Structure formats: C-alpha cells, structure tokens
Image (spheres, rainbow, N blue to C red):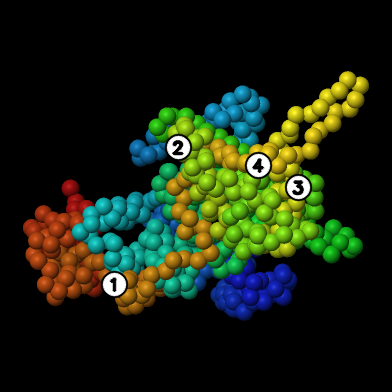
C-alpha cells in the first residue's frame, strides 16, 4: 500500500478512515466491481463451456491505471519484456551487449576494498551477503528497439530538433508506449510547474515498466523475497527504470508522502545495494525519519509501537549488508566504507536510536558522529537559527562551538591534507554534508533534540581535552593538575573516506523539497500537442509522419515550409528521418486511409514506410 501514491495521498489529506480500513473501498473500486459483475452476467447468459470462469482485475502496486493510458503491448506484441541474465542467456544472446555483460563489481569479488584490506572477515561477510544473487534485465522487442534507435538518432543529431519540448510531445503522442520519452515529457511538465499532468505521465511511465515486470521482481510483503534480485543500471534499458523510480520517490517526498517515498526508495536500493547508482542513500534516511509511522502496539498498555522508520535505519546499519563502494578509474583502486561513514547516516542512526528510547546507544552514536564530522554541528545550528551567542545554565554554546568551527576553515585543513586523495575525499564529504544539512535540518530543530546535541557535543569537547603533566609521588595517588588557561583549545577535524567520492557527482537539486521551475515563457509548450501526448488514442494519426514528409505533405514539414525554412535544411531533415536517397521510391504512409493504402500498395514502385521491400 505504501507504493501506491493514491493511497498515500488519501492517507495524507484526510482519507485515513478509508485507507486504514481494508474493508472499505472507494468509488472507483465500486465501479470496477460493477463492470466485472455485468461482464460475468453477460457471460453466464451467453452460456458455453467457460461461463464459470471469473475475471479478476490485476492489482498494480504503484497506483491505479487510467483508461486513457491504454494497454501496453506485450513483448511479443512489440513492448518490453524481462529476462534473467543466466549463463545460457549470455551464450545464446542475439546482441553484443548480452555477450559482453558479466556480473559487475563489487558483486563478483570477495574482498573489494583497499580501505580495510586487513579485515579479512569483513571481506568474507561481504561475499556471503548475497550468495544466491539473480540478475534480471529488461528486454526490448524488435519494434521497441526500432523506436529506441530512432529516438537515439534524433538525440544525437542537433538538427533533428529533439531539444524542442513540442517535438518531444509529438514523439510521445506517436509512441505512447515508449517509456524513455514519457519520462522526459513528465519532467518537462514538472519544470514548468505543471505538476498534475507531470505526475500523470510519471505514473504512466511506471505503469509501462510494472506491466513488463513479473510478480517475483516486484516488492512484496515477504521481506526475504526480493533480497537477492538485482538489476544492472548500465545494461540497457534498465537506466530508464531506475530513473523513473527515483523521480517517483523524489516527487512523493515533495508532496509530503514520506512513507510512499521511503517504500519506493527501499525498492530502488534493493535493485543494486552495493553501488547505489541513483544516490538513494543520500535521502533515504530522511524519508525514514520524516515518515514518523509507528508499528501496532504489542500490548494494550502501550499506546504506540516502535517507530517503523527509525527501526528500519537501525536494522539496516546493524545488518552491515549495505556498504559504500567506489572504483577509481584513474588508479584502478577499489575503495569501500561502512554505511556510518556517510554523514547523513551517522547522524540519522543516532537520531533513530534516540527515537527508539535507546538513550545510551544514541549518546554514543551521536558523539561518534560529532567526532567524525564536526563541521555538521555549526551548519545545523545555523540552518535552525539557534542562538549560539547566548549563555544559560542548560546550554553554553560559546564554550563548545570553537572546537567545531575549526573544521569549517578550509585553510587549516589544506595544511594537513597534502595528498590528492585526501583533498578529493574532503571535497566529496563537504558536498554530502551540504546535502544532508539542507534537507535534514528540520529534524534537528526541536528543543529536546537541540539540548541533546549540546550535551553530546560538550562530552566530545571535554572528553578529549589536552591534559597537562601530572604530579606523581611514590605511595600517593595520581593527582591531575587543573586545566590552565594556556592550554591549547580543542580542535576537531572531519574524517572522510575515499569511497565517498562515489557521490561527488550527485546533483544537490535532486534532493531538495521542490523543483526549480522555469517561467512558462521560457518553454513555450503548445497545448494542442501536449494534450494528445497525455491521452492515448489509436484512432488519431501520427504527428511525425515519415511518408507524408517525403511527399512534402507532413504536418511538421508543412509548418516548416510555411515558415520559410531553406531547402538545404529540409534535405537535412529528410536525412535525419531516413528519407534521403529514396527519390525513386514512393513511400506510403501507414496512417493513410486503408482503401487508399491498399490501392497504392499494388503499384510495383511503392513501398510502405517502415516495411522492408521483398527480396
């Protein structure tokens, strides 16, 4: 249910009475059941051998299907399919991409990190984490591959004009079951602040992928069912599926549906947990803590059970199944670190323990996070507008913060980090700290949390203060001298692992709570073109009609001729569409009337666009 955005929105906007009771259904379900009953009654009235067969509507995990989306074709009918990348498939594969594919790093090695080579036990544990891993990939049919080839040709040629969103809308209208362009069109609508239609297209794109996926590859209530089912994002066309899941997670989080974003993010992470190609780990902890869902109480004495999001963070960290892995292409070195080496997970792990009322463990985890990443504390206080100049009996920030502010001065750190790897690691770590503070700072602004931050930071500063020489006498106990005013102040410096460079290229705007939209004048979308892209109508003709373009009668070519487009540019456009060199062949448009198309096909010099001539 958490994967269904409609369910999450009803729960968020006051539909908890419907969403929380599985016996209650909404109007759409009632209408669907009535249609099924009418269909069954008609079947019984007609009689026959199969009149007792029941029609069961398929349930989709990511939301209900709208009639205007149409029914995607199967793999045999020209759509997407799914296959397992076994050794037999690789040997019998009909494409070079299948033959070249192998299990990617770090899943194909036991010990995959130079950062902890001395810990052989950890390498063995990593090798045994996924002993029965199965790799799957989407498989494009011949028709889908042809559409993909045309799309890539138009993208590679700037003269094709695929950068025009109106041309993209026409391509979506002509190819309503091509997922990549539907996803791009959805993001165009989001960036012009048309969230309603953008969300509709985004869910439609997910519907195409979900139709192709078997039930064994989809999330289920069984936590062990999907633990060892992986996908390689570098194997086409899996990248579009990963991008679609990330955008659904991102837009759900922007809408305030944090449980939905958490469920989608967990599924996305499970497809490739050791490489995390979409950077889900940079935001997944926030969705877990922001969801604030509690489990069912175990007894009547307890009002609420443990918080589910906090329990998920603690379980994931303590399982040690997810690690950060990065391969340096320049040096061919492999770097690996634990999940707590990410700044956001170090602090979120402490917050999760704090919410689960594990006070001692939470204090220890927060102190360790403050010692490892001291630059986070001043940034969190600044974002939450905490008065760090005031003094009180409970908090005295002026005596604590100087030890943490030392880490913010880049000049002090550059004197220590003389190696290139250390500077690269620090740049990546500062990048991740910035993303964490900008998104998670609201979780740390409550008064009790600020007080807890101060207590732990005070222990960090006092626990490692430099001690002066002690007077030791024979037969007497050790007596430490009191701290002098001449003692050097405590200076803390952040420690970042080289494996964090894996996330150095992540865009911070992908983890914000809103899109940076463009004004409508910047992207002039034609509503007459966007409308057909949103609704699938098999009776409507194509916008980009190659046959008519060859004869000068296509919609796009007529508009270009009316606009005074030079003849050489028209010839280049004909070359992009694959029409160059066909002067002696009369290409027939498949969208022409059926009788006209039949009579023209009888001519020996005619050829149907997209159909190879007979040998």
Label drawn at residue 541? 1
Mark 2–mark 4 Cα distance, whole angstroms, equals: 64 Å
Question: Residue at horizontal 16%, vertical 71%?
Answer: 560
Mark 3 surroundings: few (<14), some (14-19) or many (≥20) residues within 10 A: many
Mark in the foreground, 4 or 1: 4
What residue does disc 4 label?
489
Mark 4–mark 1 Cα distance, whole angstroms, equals: 76 Å
**Do labels 4 and 1 touch, CB within 8 Å?**
no
Mark 1 surroundings: few (<14), some (14-19) or many (≥20) residues within 10 A: few
* First in residue order: circle 4 vs circle 1: 4
Q: Secondary structure at mark 3?
A: helix
Q: Is residue 94 left or right of residue 384?
A: left
Residue 405, position as x, y percentages in the image? 59, 49
What residue does disc 2 label?
89
What residue does disc 3 label?
363
Question: Residue at horizontal 23%, vertical 54%?
Answer: 157
Mark in the foreground, 2 or 4: 4
């Amino acid at each position: 249910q958490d994967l269904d955005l409609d369910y999450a929105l009803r729960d968020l906007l006051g539909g908890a009475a419907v969403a929380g009771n599985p016996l209650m259904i909404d109007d759409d379900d009632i209408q669907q059941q009535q249609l099924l009953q009418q269909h069954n009654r008609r079947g019984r009235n007609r009689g026959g051998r199969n009149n007792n067969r029941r029609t069961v509507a398929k349930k989709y995990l990511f939301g209900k299907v709208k009639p205007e989306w149409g029914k995607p074709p199967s793999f045999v009918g020209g759509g997407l399919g799914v296959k397992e990348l076994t050794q037999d498939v690789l040997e019998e594969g009909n494409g070079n991409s299948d033959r070249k594919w192998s299990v990617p790093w770090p899943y194909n090695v036991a010990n995959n990190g130079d950062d902890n080579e001395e810990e052989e036990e950890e390498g063995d544990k990593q090798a045994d984490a996924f002993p029965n891993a199965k790799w799957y990939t989407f498989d494009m049919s011949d028709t889908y591959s042809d559409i993909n080839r045309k799309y890539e040709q138009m993208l590679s040629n700037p003269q094709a004009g695929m950068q025009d969103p109106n041309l993209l809308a026409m391509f979506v209208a002509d190819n309503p079951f091509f997922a990549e362009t539907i996803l791009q069109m959805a993001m165009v609508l989001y960036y012009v602040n048309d969230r309603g239609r953008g969300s509709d297209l985004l869910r439609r794109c997910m519907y195409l992928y979900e139709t192709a996926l078997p039930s064994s590859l989809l999330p289920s209530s069984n936590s062990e069912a999907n633990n060892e089912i992986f996908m390689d994002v570098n194997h086409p066309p899996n990248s579009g599926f990963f991008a679609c899941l990330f955008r659904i997670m991102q837009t759900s989080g922007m809408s305030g549906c944090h449980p939905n974003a958490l469920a989608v993010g967990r599924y996305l992470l499970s497809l490739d947990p050791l490489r995390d190609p979409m950077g889900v780990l940079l935001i997944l902890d926030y969705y877990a803590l922001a969801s604030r869902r509690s489990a069912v109480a175990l007894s009547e004495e307890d009002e609420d059970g443990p918080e589910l999001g906090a329990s998920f963070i603690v379980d994931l960290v303590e399982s040690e199944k997810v690690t950060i892995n990065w391969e340096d292409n320049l040096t061919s070195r492999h770097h690996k670190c634990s999940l707590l080496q990410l700044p956001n997970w170090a602090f979120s792990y402490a917050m999760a323990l704090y919410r689960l009322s594990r006070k001692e463990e939470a204090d220890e985890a927060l102190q360790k996070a403050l010692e490892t990443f001291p630059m986070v504390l001043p940034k969190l206080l600044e974002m939450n507008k905490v008065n760090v100049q005031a003094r009180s009996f409970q908090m005295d920030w002026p005596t604590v913060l100087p030890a943490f502010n030392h880490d913010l001065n880049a000049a002090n750190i550059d004197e220590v980090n003389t190696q290139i790897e250390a500077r690269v690691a620090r740049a990546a770590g500062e990048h991740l700290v910035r993303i964490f503070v900008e998104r998670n700072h609201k979780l740390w602004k409550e008064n009790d949390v600020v007080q807890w931050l101060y207590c732990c930071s005070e222990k960090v500063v006092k626990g490692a203060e430099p001690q002066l020489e002690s007077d030791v006498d024979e037969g007497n106990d050790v007596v430490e001298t009191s701290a002098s005013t001449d003692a050097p102040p405590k200076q803390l410096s952040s420690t970042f692992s080289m494996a964090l460079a894996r996330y150095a290229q992540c865009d911070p705007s992908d983890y914000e709570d809103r899109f940076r939209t463009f004004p409508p004048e910047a992207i002039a979308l034609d509503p007459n073109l966007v409308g057909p892209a949103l609704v699938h109508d098999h009776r409507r003709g194509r916008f980009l009609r190659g046959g008519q373009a060859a004869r000068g009668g296509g919609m796009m070519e007529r508009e270009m001729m009316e606009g005074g487009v030079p003849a050489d540019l028209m010839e280049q456009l004909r070359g992009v569409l694959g029409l160059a060199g066909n002067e002696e062949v009369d290409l027939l448009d498949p969208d022409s009337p059926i009788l006209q198309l039949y009579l023209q096909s009888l001519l020996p010099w005619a050829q149907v666009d997209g159909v190879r001539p007979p040998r």
